[in-house]
Amino acid sequence: MGRVEALRLILLYVHLIGFALLLGGAIAQYLTGKLRVNAAMLWGAVIQVLSGIGLSAPLRDGDEPAPGKLVTKLVIALLIFVMVFFSRKRTEVNRGHFLAIVGLTLVNAAVAVFWR
């Protein structure tokens, strides 16, 4: 395995950790019954955007994801980040807003897996 492939795998690993923080933090809050943005969700959203930008770099020697897929994932990730960032200081978040964060997180994962 070359250095570039190792870097890509590390970025993918970090990206998955961001996803786990974002979705896990949201599920934890949902189960408590008090819908608010916690630190795990905020850091997960930040990690997702930054590592996603790193993953979009041409690191695969011609086997690059479709530009449409990258743009779609970036737009969704930025929407999630904005929703999380501007809700982080609220003591409670509207149910629809909170579920939209969870739904967009799942849609972003679906785009990553199913868009070939």
Image: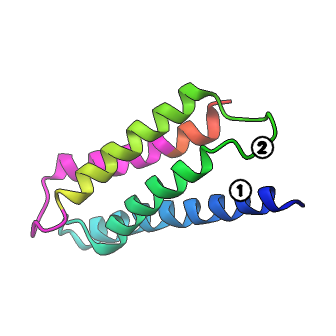
Residue 89 image label: none
Residue designated by label 1: 8
| Whole-percent x, y for residue 61 in the image | 81, 40
Q: Quadrant of the C terminus?
A: top right
Q: Write down the quadrant of residue 23 in the picture.
A: bottom left
Q: Residue at x 31, y 43 (%)?
A: 79
| Whole-percent x, y for residue 9 in the image | 72, 60
Identify the magenta region: 88-108
Residue designated by label 2: 60
Q: Amino acid at mark 2?
A: Arg
Q: Quadrant of the N terminus?
A: bottom right
Q: Residue furthest right?
A: 1
Q: Is residue 101 magenta?
A: yes
Q: Is residue 97 left or right of residue 9?
A: left
Q: Compared to 71, does 95 lie above or below?
A: below
Q: Is residue 26 left or right of residue 65?
A: left
| Whole-percent x, y for residue 111 in the image | 54, 36
- Chief secondary structure of the magenta portion: helix
Q: Residue furthest left?
A: 91
Q: Residue at x 20, y 68 (%)?
A: 33
Label 2 Cα crowd, 10 Å radius (few <14 / some 14-19 / many 20+) = few
| Whole-percent x, y for residue 16 in the image | 57, 61
Mark 2 in CB contact with mark 1 (< 8 angstroms): yes
Label 1 Cα crowd, 10 Å radius (few <14 / some 14-19 / many 20+) = some
Q: Is residue 36 left or right of residue 58?
A: left
